[in-house]
Amino acid sequence: MKTELLEKQTFIEPDKIFKLLEENRNPSKQQIREIISKSLEIETLTPQEVACLINLKDEDLWHEIFKTALEIKKKVYDNRIVVFAPLYITSYCINNCLYCGFRKTNTVVQRKVLTFDEIKKEVQVLAGDIGHKRVIAVFGEHPKYSNIDYIVKTLQTIYSVKVTTKTGSLASIRRVNVNCAPLSVEELKLLKQAGIGTYQVFQETYHPGMYRKIHPNNTPKSNYEWRLYCMHRALEAGIEDVGIGVLYGLYDWRFEILALVCHARELEEKYGVGPHTVSFPRLEPAINTPFVEKTPYKVKDEELKKIITIIRLAIPYTGMIITARESKEFRDEVFKLGITQTDASSKIGVGSYSQPQQQQQPNLQQFILGDTRTLEELILDLAKMGYITSFCTAGYRCGRTGDKIMNLIKCGKEAVFCKLNAILTFREWIDDFATEEVKKEVEPIIEKELKEVEQKLPKWFPHLVEFYNRIKNGERDIYF
């Protein structure tokens, strides 16, 4: 399949991607097992190796790969799932993306932008009532309502909120990630100074022809190349943690994941650091948005499970995010395939945390959520599956970012910090926010994790016990 030429040569070469998919249609068992072994060494796969996984039909080998994905995740990030909450700041946007409920011409959407006082109210609920420690602030693209000054002031506002919990401790958001339009290097430097966590921009689709078809001309988002190179600019600006992704359902998923791996390898080769996270959003229904129903590229559950698994093997060091777009049942399944982060108690109407009656009103949201579990409900479900919930933000404040964390991941050391800090932050949440009924349910998982540290990491155990007891006695935000 030929594709239109880009305005300039980029690291995404569609014809080469199609050729790789065609040339690796029948991978041998030996090839697949060699690829599995390479992934277990925490090495990024080549595009050819990814093409082999994409084309694999052998179901027995797929079962082996599913198990490998979880093994890689445990090796890299141990037995924890990090939680966060999305915080939608504005629904104003000057783009006109065909698949988006917030597109400019969608007149049935009720538009809103949060004032800084309203942002504080949202954070008071997130940090003080629910217990979240990290959020991702989500902005549209609008010169008035999502310019760099407003984004920076938003971060400063979120970080400024301190809430007293029922135990008398102070709760706050410790890490703010940002999902916003591509920015210039100068603007990204301002975000860095404001204390941004991860800078998250999804390419949506890596296919140039489809990209231009669904992002109309004369809108900022119609510039494929500007968006494609936004992570280059972020890394040049000093933002070490970047998050990428594809909106599955816009184009053939086989092409998309091969292109995404090319993106990760490009960043590794140029900057020595790949994506801190990869997300897996899938097209969901949105009010007055017929494109979602008409797309010929809908991704089935079984296909998305394979996509997640392939990326876990292909980019073994990366954090992987599944969101409440998906159903409870599907999310619970893919936690076993290498997912490391997820959201909970999510509300995506602008202002919906402090005004919960707005939640699930289609004209206030970009799309409709699939999983509306509270944080408490998710924590209970994760505990039943044997996972500890983590609120850790330590690495970012200790300087374990960028190439530093990649090196720690590849040698297996980061998993140690993940385990220790998951225990400490989970203890905080239990003491500050859990009901007595929930405490009874989740104490066994924290006891299990403590025993594992004592048995497998004996030199760390005395330090962990010291920090753990300090938290039980009321101290907060102690970390390794």
Image (cartoon, grey):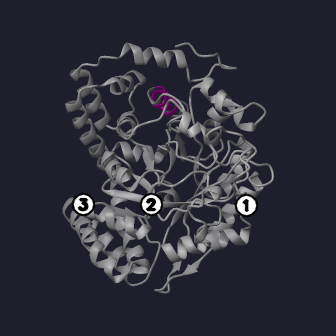
Does the rendering let one see residue 172? Answer: no
Task: Give amino acid for label 2.
Answer: Val
Classified by dominant secondary structure, the portion drawn in magenta counts as: helix
Tell me where the magenta segment starts and ends, as one range: 255-264
Front-most of residues 114 and 291 = 291
Residue behind mark 2: 83
Relative image position of residue 417 (x, y in whole percent): 37, 58
Does the rendering let one see residue 379? Answer: yes
State the residue at coordinates (40%, 42%). 317
Q: Of the numbered discs in the image, which one, if any, rests on residue 362?
A: none
Task: Give amino acid for label 1.
Answer: Val
Q: Which one is earlier in the sequence, the residue at label 1 or at label 2?
A: 2
Q: Are marks 1 and 2 in contact (CB under 8 Å)?
A: no
> In this rendering, which labeled residue sits more in front, label 1 or label 3?
1
State the residue at coordinates (61%, 72%). 354
Q: CA distance from mark 2 to mark 3?
A: 25 Å
Q: Is residue 84 left or right of residue 384?
A: right
State the residue at coordinates (58%, 70%). 356
Residue behind mark 3: 457
Classify residue 294 by image quadrant: top right
Residue behind mark 1: 113
Q: Secondary structure at mark 3?
A: loop
Relative image position of residue 231 (x, y in whole percent): 60, 39
